[in-house]
């Protein structure tokens, strides 16, 4: 049995963040025939689930670049790859000392929240404005308040202290990071998570959960590279960045030309 796992933005989703009727109909037909299919994304469940709600997913999904593996229908956490207390202490100390206020993803009173520092709102204004109505958003008055709850992910938008951050958020210190330009805007996202979290590790966790013999993964951007390399077959869509294309075993049609669904359909006909 083969497990198909795809990135969302720029890969399964078209450039306008939608799914074509061809992709929805084709994947639902194949899933109905027993094909195992799901997604691996940097998004949260609240952000990702509405985008793929028309697909009858039958496997766990990967969220936050591999921090969580969840039930794709309910969002229930199946595995968690989160910070150690030592990592959290180091991150808090660095951000407070350098007065760098990240977007802080955490659970507070059992609810997922995305916190930002009120005094540095200009740095995250575009992010917040694009998510008006998102109940996860939380304004913090101080760094102490910013770091409330059980934190599992940090994002710094358009960082000005990249070199210094690179020296702190290292694998030796217990961190993994991803630095890339956003698919839809011109922001640079500096994302920080625990070193046990990656799309590659989480994809293998999903493969083990479903008992698949082989893993085929699709992607378009830098944060997909680990997953593409670890898969039995790693596939880049035509619109993927050059770094990913160099790592891929195959290149298929672009996201706007239904590359993922077309490949799955061809492969299942063999």
Image (cartoon, rainbow, N blue to C red):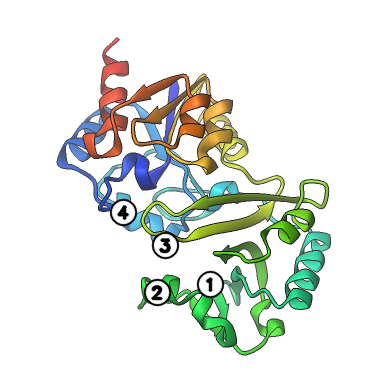
Marks 1 and 2, Cα distance to the nearest angstrom?
A: 9 Å
- The residue identified by callout 4 is 51
**Residue displayed at 54% across by 35% down:** 225
Q: Position of residue 224 (x, y in %)?
A: 51, 38
The tag on residue 134 is: 2
**Residue displayed at 40% across by 36% down:** 240
Marks 3 and 1, Cα distance to the nearest angstrom?
A: 12 Å
Marks 4 and 3, Cα distance to the nearest angstrom?
A: 10 Å
Mark 4 or mark 3: name the one nearer the start of the chain: 3
Circle 1 packing at 10 Å, graded few (<14), some (14-19), many (20+), is: many
The tag on residue 114 is: 1
Closer to the observer: label 3 or label 1? 1
6 to 69, vertically: above or below: above
- The residue identified by callout 3 is 46
The tag on residue 71 is: none
The residue tagged with tag 3: helix, strand or loop? helix
Mark 3 or mark 1: name the one nearer the start of the chain: 3
The residue tagged with tag 2: helix, strand or loop? loop
Cβ atoms at labels 3 and 2 below 8 Å apart: yes
Marks 4 and 2, Cα distance to the nearest angstrom?
A: 15 Å
Mark 1 or mark 4: name the one nearer the start of the chain: 4
The residue tagged with tag 4: helix, strand or loop? helix
The residue tagged with tag 1: helix, strand or loop? strand
**Relative to residue 29, is residue 59 drawn left or right?**
right
**Residue displayed at 33% across by 40% down:** 12
């Amino acid at each position: 049995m083969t497990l198909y796992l795809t990135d969302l933005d720029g890969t399964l989703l078209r450039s306008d963040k939608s799914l074509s009727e061809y992709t929805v109909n084709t994947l639902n037909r194949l899933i109905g025939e027993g094909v195992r299919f799901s997604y691996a994304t940097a998004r949260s469940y609240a952000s990702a689930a509405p985008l793929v709600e028309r697909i009858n997913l039958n496997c766990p999904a990967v969220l936050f670049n591999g921090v969580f593996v969840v039930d794709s229908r309910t969002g229930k956490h199946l595995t968690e790859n989160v910070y150690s207390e030592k990592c959290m202490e180091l991150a808090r100390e660095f951000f407070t000392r350098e007065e760098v206020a990240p977007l802080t993803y955490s659970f507070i009173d059992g609810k997922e929240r995305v916190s930002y520092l009120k005094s540095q709102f200009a740095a995250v204004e575009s992010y917040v404005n694009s998510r008006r109505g998102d109940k996860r958003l939380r304004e913090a008055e101080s760094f102490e308040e910013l770091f409330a709850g059980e934190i599992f992910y940090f994002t710094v938008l358009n960082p000005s202290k990249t070199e210094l951050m690179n020296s702190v958020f290292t694998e030796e210190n217990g961190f993994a990071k991803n630095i890339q330009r956003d698919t839809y805007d011109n922001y640079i996202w500096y994302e920080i998570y625990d070193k046990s979290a990656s799309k590659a590790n989480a994809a293998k966790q999903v493969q083990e959960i479903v008992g698949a013999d082989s893993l085929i993964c699709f992607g378009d951007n830098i944060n997909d590279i680990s997953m593409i390399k670890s898969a039995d077959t790693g596939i880049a869509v035509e619109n993927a960045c050059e770094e990913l294309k160099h790592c891929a075993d195959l290149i298929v049609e672009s996201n706007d030309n239904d590359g993922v669904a077309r490949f799955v359909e061809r492969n299942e006909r063999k």
